Image: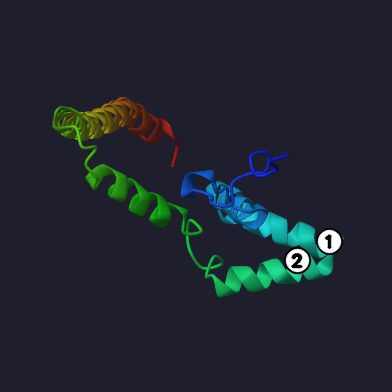
Amino acid sequence: MNTASSTPSSTMTYSDHRPGFFARAEGWLDERGKGAWIAAMVLGFIFIWPVGLALLAYMIWSKRMFNKSCGHSRHHARHTLRHMSMSSGNSAFDAYKAETLRRLEEEQSNFEAFLKRLREAKDKAEFDQFMDDRAADAPNAKDDAENEPA
């Protein structure tokens, strides 16, 4: 009987590799930010103090305590940049992707400019309303001051 065919292959490709529990937990906590790390550390101290101490040491060692986003945005930016610059091997798709990304960036900048104009218009309208209310209240305040006995 040939048992070699029933056992899994000893050569494992990179795509078959799944990150371990600790790597998945670290990724999960990184996605949720510094608050999740602190909550995990506090819960670790409450239930099993060595776990809390280990998390505190890891957070200090990896500088997660002092970063704004636990390194997630840095990793995400690197990951995105690497995938955006890679060619798919299909020149038509690469041209389409470049044009779509350019168009999306242009739409984003146009939308941000629109939001800025919208905020400025809202601020101007609120300021004009304030000035109109102030101007309307000024004659009333002057009349009240004249009618008060001294």
What's the amino acid at mark 2? Gly
Of the 4 image quadrants, the one containing the C terminus is top left
Instruction: Give the residue at mark 2.
Output: 52
Q: Is residue 137 left or right of residue 37?
A: left
Horizontal and vertical percent position of residue 144: 40, 31
Look at the picture and state if 107 lies above or below 44: above
Look at the picture and state if 5 lies above or below 140: below
> Helix, strand, or loop for circle 1?
helix
Q: Residue at x 84, y 63 (%)?
A: 48
> Helix, strand, or loop for circle 2?
helix
Who is closer to the viewer here, 81 or 29? 81
Q: Residue at x 19, y 32 (%)?
A: 90
The outermost residue toward the front is 1
CA–CA distance between discs 2 and 1?
Answer: 8 Å
Horizontal and vertical percent position of residue 111: 23, 29
Who is closer to the viewer here, 85 or 70? 85
Q: Residue at x 62, y 70 (%)?
A: 58
Of the 4 image quadrants, the one containing the N terminus is top right
Who is closer to the viewer here, 27 or 6? 6
Mark closer to the chain start, 2 or 1 = 1
Dots 2 and 1: beta carbons under 8 Å? yes
Horizontal and vertical percent position of residue 82: 30, 50
Q: Is residue 105 left or right of residue 63?
A: left
What's the amino acid at mark 1? Ile
Horizontal and vertical percent position of residue 117: 21, 31
Q: Residue at x 29, y 49 (%)?
A: 81
Who is closer to the viewer here, 25 or 91? 91
Look at the picture and state if 4 lies above or below 62: above
Question: Which of the numbered marks, if any, corresponds to residue 46?
Answer: 1
Q: Is residue 12 left or right of residue 37?
A: left
Q: Is residue 131 left or right of residue 19?
A: left
User: Badge 1: few (under 14), some or many (20 or more) residues near its Cα, within 10 Å?
Assistant: few
